[in-house]
Amino acid sequence: MDVGIIATQAFNGLSLFSILLLMALGLAIVFGLMGVINLAHGEFMMIGAYVTYVTQLFFAHHLKFIFNFYIFVALILSFFLTAFIGLLAERFLIQYLYKRPLDTLLATWGLSLILQQSFRNIFGANNVNVDMPSWLIGSLNISTDFSLPYNRLFIFFLSVLCVIGIFLFLFKTRWGLKIRAVTQNRNMSSALGINVRRVDSLAFAIGSGLAGIAGCALTMIGSVGPSTGQNYIVDSFMVVILGGIQSLIGTILSAFTIAEIQSIGEFFSSSSMAKAITLIAIIVLLQIRPKGLFIIRVRS
Amino acid sequence: MSDKSLSRRKFLKKAIGTGVGVMGLSLFSEMSWINDVWAKEDVIKVGILHSFSGTMAISEVSVAQAELMAIEEINKNGGVLGKKIVPVIEDGASDWPTFAEKAKKLLLKDKVATVFGCWTSASRKAVLPVFERYNGLLWYPVQYEGMECSRNIFYIGAAPNQQIMPAVSWLLKNVGKRFYLLGSDYVFPRTANLIIKAQLKHEGGITVAEEYVPLGHMEFSTIINKIKAKKPDVIFNTINGDSNVAFFKQLKSVGITANVIPVMSVSIAEDELRGIGGELVEGHLCAWNYFQTLDNSINKKFVANFKKKYGENRVTDDPIEAGYIAVYLWAKAVEKAGKTDVDAVREAARNLEMDAPEGHVKIDAENQHLWKTPRIGKIRADGLFDIIWDAKTPVKPDPFPALVSNKVCNWLKYPKTGIGRR
Amino acid sequence: MGKSLVNKDLKSLVFYILFFGSLLFFFPFVLSDFRLNLLGKFLSFAIVAMGIALAWGYTGILSLGQGIFFGLGAYAMAMYLKLEASGPDLPDFMFWNGLTSLPWFWKPFKSAPFAFLMVIIVPLLLALIVGFVTFRRRISGVYFSLISQALTLVFFILFVGQQGYTGGTNGITDFSTIFGYQLFSKTTQHLIYYITVFVLFLLFLFGSWLVKSQFGKILVAIRDKEDRIRFSGYNPDNFKMLIFAISAVYAGIAGALFVLQEGLISPSIFGVVPSIEMVIWAAIGGRTSLLGAAIGALLVNTAKTFLSENFPEIWLYFLGILFIIVVRFLPEGLVSLFNRKSSFSNLINKIKLSLGAKYVRTS
Amino acid sequence: MSELVKHILYIEDLTVSFDGFKALDGLNFYVEINELRVVIGPNGAGKSTLLDVICGKTRPEKGEVLFYEKIDLKKLKEHEIARLGIGRKFQTPSIYEDLTVLENLTISYPKKKTVFSALFFKLSPMDKEKIEEMLHFVGLIDKRHLKAGLLSHGEKQWLEIAMILIQNPKLVLLDEPVAGMSAKEREKTVSLLKKIAPGRSMVVIEHDMEFVKNIAQRVTVLHQGKVLCEGNIERIQNDPKVQEVYLGGYKVATN
Amino acid sequence: MLQIKNLHAYYGESHIIKGVSLELNKKETVCILGRNGMGKTTFMKAVIGLLKPKEGQIFLENEDITMFEPFEKVKRKIAYVPQGREIFPYLTVQENLEVALEASNKKVIPDFIFELFPVLKDMLNRKGGNLSGGQQQQLAIARALVSDPKIILLDEPTEGIQPSIIEEIAKVLNILKKEKGISILLTEQVLNFALETSDRFYIIEKGQFVHETTKEQADVQKLKAFLTF
Ligand SMILES: Nc1ncnc2c1ncn2[C@@H]1O[C@H](COP(=O)(O)OP(=O)(O)OP(=O)(O)O)[C@@H](O)[C@H]1O
Ligand SMILES: Nc1ncnc2c1ncn2[C@@H]1O[C@H](COP(=O)(O)OP(=O)(O)OP(=O)(O)O)[C@@H](O)[C@H]1O
Ligand SMILES: NC(N)=O
Ligand SMILES: [Mg+2]
Ligand SMILES: [Mg+2]
C-alpha cells in the first residue's frame, strides 16, 4: 500500500467525521439537550436538501451569472426554512410532549411520514439532481495519488464553523444559558423569569436549522430523494448517544470515533460489514461507558 | 377560557370517536357479504402493484405511470374484448410482506384478471407463491438475475443473457480485463456478480474486487480509495437506487471520470439519471434493451405520448417501456384467447410477438421470458444515451445461464415444474 | 370504593368476553378468507404489541428492536417450512447462491418440535444476552432504545449479507406444507387462525397474571425509580432481563404465527421502520394495558390496510396524522376512551392541561 | 455472629473524592450494635455521602467499610446490601409515585426478593396486618389506595420511613427524616424511632436540634469530611468548634 | 403590594386551595403556617403561576396578574424559592445564579450574595447537582435574590439547613425587608424561624386559612397547637 492511499484514507476518516458531526449537531441540541427523540431529523435534513435544490434551480434559471455562489444562499435559506418548520413542529406538536420524551419518538415518526409524503407530492417520487457549483467539483491535488476533493474540504470547514458557532452560542451567550437552564428544569426557569416557550421554540428551531444546513451540505456528496432522510437517522442518533447526551464535546469525540472505525473497517472489509462492525463497536463502547464517552455526572 | 376548552373538548371527543369509528367501519366494510353486494359493472379489472412509498418509489412510480398510460390508450381504442380495463392500484410500500398481502388482496378480493407490478427481485419472490397458489398472472417489467421459472409470471425485463452477460463480453473486448464489481447488498447484485465472475473466469477476465454496500449507503470515499488502489479497467455497477447518486458524485470529485475508469451500470436508466445529473456521469456506460433515444417511429410516438401525459421534463427508460408493453402483450393475449381466464391467456401468450418501442419482441414459448435485443449506451451530458452497440437481433432469453447452472426452464418440455436438466 | 372496583372488573370482564368471543364466533363467519387471513396476521401483531406493553408500558423498557425477535421467531418457523417444502433438495435460494449442502445449523430445523422450540428459545436467549450486556451496565431509557435500534440494523445487515444461509433480501418464501398438510388450504388456514386467537388469549392471561403479581408491581416500581428499588433489596437488572425476554418471546411466537399465515419472511422485518411501527401499535392502543396494546395493533393495521387500499398514493398522510393525534391527545392510548368514567375525565383534564395550563406539573 | 462483634458498622480511613474534592477525608466512624447514632454537621460536611457509601451508592476511594466487622460493603451491590438488612431513607423523599401507598409498602416487605419469588409472592394475613398497622402508624391508612405521587411532601417522607421500617432492617439509615415535617409529625417521628429502636441500630442525620436532642444518645459531628467531635448532646452543644461551624447562636431549650 | 382574593386551585379534579385571600404589604413578611399536606406549596405555586388558579384574583400593585405566566410575574419583580430546591443540576453554581439575572437589569451577580452565602463563592464552578442538600437550598435562596425582587416567595426555606445558617437566613430576610424594602411571603412549619422573621401569620388547614394573627398579638401556644393537631 502506498503513502497516497494511506493519506487518502486518513483524510476520508476526517471527512466522514465532519459529515457525521454535521448530521448530529442539530440532534445534539434537539435530542441531547432537549430530550426530544426526533425521528424526523432525517426529513428535516431533506428539507435543507430540497431548499438547496430549489435555490439551485432558481439560480440556474434567473441568476445564471452568479450560479457558482448559489450554495451560500442555499445554506442560509436551508437553515432558516428548516428552522421555521422546526418552529412550527415545536409550536403545534413537540411542546406538548416535553414531559413524555419517549412519546416524542412516536409523534415525530408521524411527522416524518407526513414530510416524506409531502416531498413525494411536491418534488416527485424520483430523486432530484442538485448541481454543484463548479468550484466545488474537482480536487486539490497534493500528489498524484493523494488529492482532497473540494466538496469534502468545504463540508469539513462548514462543520468546523458550525461546531464553533454552536459552542459559542450555547456557552457564551445568555440565550445559550437560557436554553441549557430550560432544558433542565422548565418550571424553575419560568419561575426565574425566563419565557420558557420562547426558549423552547428557539432551541428546537436552531437544532432543526442545523439539520437543514447538514442537508444542504449533503447534496454535495449524496442524493436527494423523499426517503433519503431515513438513511441518516440511525447514524445521527448513534453519534449523540455514544458521545453522551448533554455533551457537545462528547458529540465531537464520538463522531470522530465512529468515523474512524467505519472508514478503517470499510477499507479492510466491506461497507456492509464495516457498518455492522461499527454499530457493534458502539454497543461495546457503551458497555465500558454506559452514559457515553463524555458525560458530566451529577448526583441526583 | 373554560368555555372555549369545553367546546374544544367536545370537538376532540367527537373527532377521536369518529376516527375510531372509521377504523371499525373499515373492518366491517371488508366483510364478505358486503363485498358481494357491491355492484358488478362489466369491466376487466387489472392490478397495478408497485411501491408508491418507501425507498423503491423512486423507481416504481414511473413504471406504474407507464402501465396506466398503456391501459388508458387501450381503453381509448375500445378496450379488450370490448370491455374497459379498470386498474386497481395497490401500494407495495417497498416492503415485501406488504407486496404479498396486496397481491393476495388483488387476486382474492378484487379478483383481477392479471397484475402488472413489482420491481425488486425480492418483491417478486414475495408475491410468486401467492400467484402460484391462486393461479394469478404477474407481468414483471424489470431486468433480473434469472434462476427463476414460474408459470404464473411473464418476465418482460431482461434475463442475464440479454443484459449483463453481453455487457461483460463487450467490456472484455472493448475496454479491459480487470473488473471491479460493486453492488448493493441485495439479491440481484449478488446473483448477477456470481454470473459475472463465472463469465470472467470463462472468457479470461479478472475480478479484482467484489464489494457490496447497504441499500441507501451514502459514503463512498473509502470504496473509491480502494478502487484507486486496485486500478481496475472497469467498474461493473449493480448498485440500486439512492446510493448511485452518492457514488457518482464522489467518484467525479476525485477525478475518476469515464476516461479514467468507465463504469458500466445495469440498474440505472434515464429516469434515475435525472436525479444524478448528466455531467456527473457523462461518458459512463449502461446496458439495457431500450433507450429513450432509440430511433424508430413506435418509440418516438411512445416517448411523445409519455411526455405529453406526464410532463416535458419526464423521460422514458427500459423498465418504463417494459411496463408499458407488458400491458399491450397481455391485452393481445386476451384478445387472442377470447377471455381473461389465466390458463387461456397463458396459452395464448406463447410465441406472441409485438413491435415495441424497443423493437421486435416475442414471448418465449418455453420459459415465458421475452426475446429482447441487448444494447449498450454511453451517457450524454443531458442524461440520455448514445447507443454505441447493439446485438442486431433479439436474443432468446435464458434464465439459467449455463455458466452457473445446469437447469433449464421449459414449460413445454417439463409441464409439471417447468425445470429440467440441461 | 369496593363497589366501583367490582363494577370495573365486571365491565372489563364483559369487554374481554366480547373481544375474544367476537374473534372466535363472529369474524370467522362474516369475513372472507382473505380478510380472515389478514385478521389472523394482525392478531399475531397484537401479540407483539402485548409484549411491548409488558416491557415498555409496565417496566419502562422501550425496545426499538422487537422486529429482531419477531424476525427470529419467524425465521425459525420459516426454516422448518422451507425444508419441508424443499423435500430432499437444497432450498432453492441456497442452490442459486452456490451452496452445495445444507448448512449445519439448518439441519435440526427439519424437525418440527425443534423448530417450534427455537421459536421461543432463540428470541429468549438473545433477549437475555442483550439484557445482560445493557441492563447490567445500567444502560437504560433512551440509551437502551437506541441501542436496540442499532442492533436491529446490525441484524438487518447480517441477514441481508448472508444470502446463502438466510435468503438475503428476499428472505425465505415459497412454502407448501406443514406436517404434511397443505399449508394454504382453507382448513389449515382456518385452524391456524383459531390457534392464533388461542395463543393470543393464553398470552393475554399470562401477561395479566404477571402484571397483577408482586412481580408486576416491582416492574412498575422499576419504571418509576429504578435506582430506588435497589435499596429495597431488589436487583432490577434481573427483573428487566426477564420481562424483556418475555416480551421477546411474545414477539418470537408472533413471528412464527405470522409466517404461517403470510407465507414468507424477509429481513425487512429487521428494519428500523417495522420495529418502530410495532411500538406505535402499542402506543396507539394503550401501552399500559395488554388488551389496549393488542387492540392498537389491530386498529393501526386495519387502518393501514384500509387507507392504503383506498388512497394508495396519499395514505401516509392519514397514518402520520393519526399517530400525531393519538400521541398528542391520548397519551394513554385509545383504551383511555373506553376506560372508566374517571379515566375519561382524566383524559379531558390532560387535554385541557396541554391546551391551556402548560406549566402544570405533578412533581 | 460471634460474641466478640461489637460494631455493626466499622468504618476506617474512609475517603471519597469528587474531581479532587474530598467529600470524606480519612473518616473513622463506628456504630455499635443496637446503638442510635445521630450525625450532624454543616451543610456539605459529607453526611449524605457517608450514607451513600454505606448503602453502596458511592464507591469510596479508599478505606474500610465493614458490616458486623467482617462483611465488606464496598464489594457489594446496592440490593445485596439492602438484603443484608440495611435500609436507607433518602434526603429528598424517594418513593414509587405510580404505585399506591399500599403497594409501596408491599414491595418493600421483607420477603425473598428474587425474580421468581416475586412471581408467586402472596401476602399472608399476618403480613397484611403488619402493613395495615404501619399505615395506621404513619397516618396514611386513609390514603392507602392513593397513588403515592399525589401525597404532599411530608406525607411522602412518612411513606418512605414506613417503607424502610417495614423492611425490618438491622441497620436503619435516615437522612434528614423530619425535614419538611410539621411539629406534630416530628413528635410522632420521635416516638416512632424510640419504639423501633430496640433491637436494631440506627444512624440518623438531622439538622433539627430539637429533634436531635429528643432522640440522641450519642452524636457525631462531621465537618469537612472528618469527625469534628463526638459525644452526648450536652457535650456537643457546648463545644466551641461545633458552635462556630454549625450551631451558631442556636441553643436547644432545655425542658 | 400583593393582594390575593378568594383563590381556588386544583390538581386535576382535586380541589386543594379553597378560597384563600391574603394581603402582603410593603416591607412586610407574612408567614403561612400549616401542617403537611395542607396546601402551602400549592398556594405558592398558584401565586407564582406554576399552577393556574381556577378562581380568584391576584393583584400586584393593582394590576391583575392572576393568569400571567410565571416569567411575566418574575419580570414584575416577584421571586420564588420552591420547596425542593430545583437547582439546575448540570449548570454550575455560577450559571445557576446567572440564569436569574434574566429578570434583573444587572449584568453581573451582585456581591452581597456571596457575603450572605460564603459557601457559594468557593463552589462557583461546581455543578449545581453536586452540591449537598443544604448548599442547594442556599443556592436556591441566593438565586432568588439575584433577580433583585420586590417580593419573595419562600416555600419552607429552612428545610435541611444547618442551624447557624438558618439564623443567618433569618437575619438576611430581616435586612432585606428593612433595608431593601422587600416584601416576603413565607411558608413554614418551624415556628421559631417564623416568629423571628414574620410580621403576620396565617394558619392554613385543608386549603383554607383558619387563623390569622400579627406578631404582636400572636399567642405562641395557640399557633403551636395549630401545628401539632
Ligand atoms: N458528585 C459530586 N461531585 C462533586 N462534589 C460533590 C459530589 N457529591 C458531593 N459533593 C460535595 O461533597 C460535599 C459533601 O456532600 P454531602 O451531600 O455528603 O453533604 P451533607 O453533609 O449531606 O450536607 P447537607 O446537610 O447539606 O445535606 C459537598 O460539599 C458536596 O458539594
Ligand atoms: N400533583 C398533585 N396532584 C394531585 N394532588 C396533589 C399533587 N401535589 C400535591 N397534592 C395534594 O395536595 C395536598 C396539598 O399539598 P401541598 O404540597 O400543597 O402541601 P404542603 O402544605 O406544601 O405540605 P408539606 O408541608 O408537606 O410540603 C396534599 O394532600 C397532596 O396530597
Ligand atoms: N430485478 C432487480 N433489479 O432487482
Ligand atoms: Mg445531605
Ligand atoms: Mg409543601
Image (tube, coloured by chain):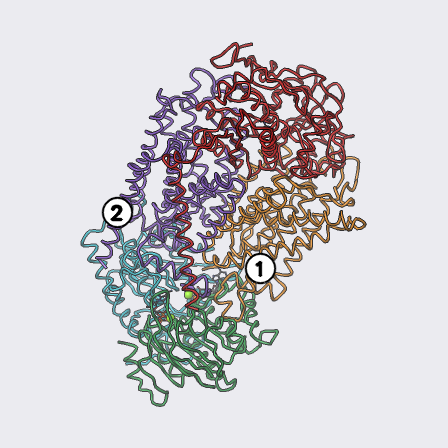
Chain colours: A orange, B red, C purple, D cyan, E green
Compared to D154, does B274 lie above or below?
Answer: above
Q: Which residue is mark 2?
A: C13
Residue nearest the viewer, comparing B337 with C302: B337
Q: Residue at x 52, y 47 (%)?
A: C317
> In whole angstroms, how far apart are the C-alphas of marks 2 and 1?
48 Å
Provide residue C233's location: percent of width, then percent of height.
33, 52
Which of the 4 quarters of the picture holds residue B163? top right
Residue type at mark 2? Leu
Q: Is residue C173 visible?
A: yes
Q: Give left or right: position of B235 versus A105.
A: right
Q: Is residue B68 left or right of residue D241?
A: right
Q: What count of labels does the image hold?
A: 2
Chain of the residue where label 1 is placed in the rendered structure: A
Instruction: Examine the rendering and report whether any part of residue D197 can be seen.
Output: no
Q: Same chain for the residues at labels 2 and 1, yes or no?
A: no
Is E224 located above or below residue B110 in the figure? Answer: below
Kindly identify which residue carries mark 1.
A203
- On the picture, is A164 further left or further right than E66? right
Quarter of the render that holds ligand 4: bottom left
Residue D130: image quadrant is bottom left
The N terminus of chain C sits in image quarter: bottom left
